[in-house]
């Protein structure tokens, strides 16, 4: 058969519930031509990896699960995820909260950056606007400096959420 003759792995396919068969991720790539008047900064070339990652991100967000994307620097993880989050349904989701970590990010700054985009419900209780969900994207999660005992306080704070 066609699948037996190729060197593909299970990771090269997605199970399509509607068709009841395996479909290559490559078939899901948006092949819309890039407009001639696009500036270089606006161009994003979709790949099998980006289609796969955005599918997984959407699946995690839809099911209220946290997700961690890791990979080499400069591969577009942040750009693709930001674009995806900004395109989410405005009726269901509050604007996403983008938090960028650096070596100097403290737990207090992290708390402030997350709380700043939330509504105060009552003393000590915060949340997205009523009837909406919020997604928080933490960029450069590994960046906060380790303290004396090897912990990274901003990450310890995130574990409490």
Image (tube, rainbow, N blue to C red):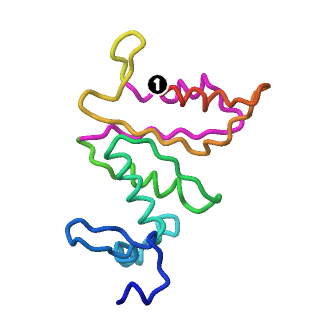
Relative to 27, residue 137 above or below: above
Left or right: residue 85 compared with residue 147: left
Residue 31 placement (x, y as % from top left): 36, 77
SS at mark 1 in the image: helix
Q: Is residue 31 visible?
A: no
Quadrant location of residue 25? bottom left
Tally of numbered discs: 1
Residue at the spot of label 1: 115
Farthest residue, direction top: 123
Residue 96 placement (x, y as % from top left): 40, 41
In the picture, which quadrant includes the N terminus? bottom left
Residue at image coords 41%, 66%: 51
| Residue range (magenta) | 92-118
Residue at image coords 62%, 25%: 107
Left or right: residue 6 compared with residue 76: left
Relative to 118, residue 42 above or below: below
Residue toward you, 124 or 23:
23
Q: Is residue 89 visible?
A: yes
| Residue 76 lies in the magenta stretch | no
Residue at image coords 46%, 26%: 116
């Amino acid at each position: 058969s066609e699948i037996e003759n190729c060197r593909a792995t299970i990771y090269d396919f997605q199970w399509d519930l509607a068709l009841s068969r395996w479909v290559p991720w490559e078939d899901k790539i948006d092949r819309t031509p890039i407009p001639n008047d696009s500036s270089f900064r606006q161009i994003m070339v979709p790949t099998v990896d980006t289609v796969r990652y955005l599918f997984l991100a959407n699946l995690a967000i839809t099911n209220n699960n946290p997700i961690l994307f890791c990979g080499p620097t400069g591969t577009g993880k942040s750009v693709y995820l930001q674009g995806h989050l900004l395109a989410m349904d405005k009726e269901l989701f509050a604007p996403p909260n983008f938090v960028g970590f650096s070596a100097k990010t403290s737990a207090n700054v992290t708390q402030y950056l997350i709380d700043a985009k939330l509504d105060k419900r009552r003393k000590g209780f915060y949340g997205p606007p009523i009837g909406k969900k919020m997604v928080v994207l933490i960029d450069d999660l590994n960046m906060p400096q380790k303290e004396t005992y090897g912990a990274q306080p901003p990450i310890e704070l995130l574990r409490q959420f």
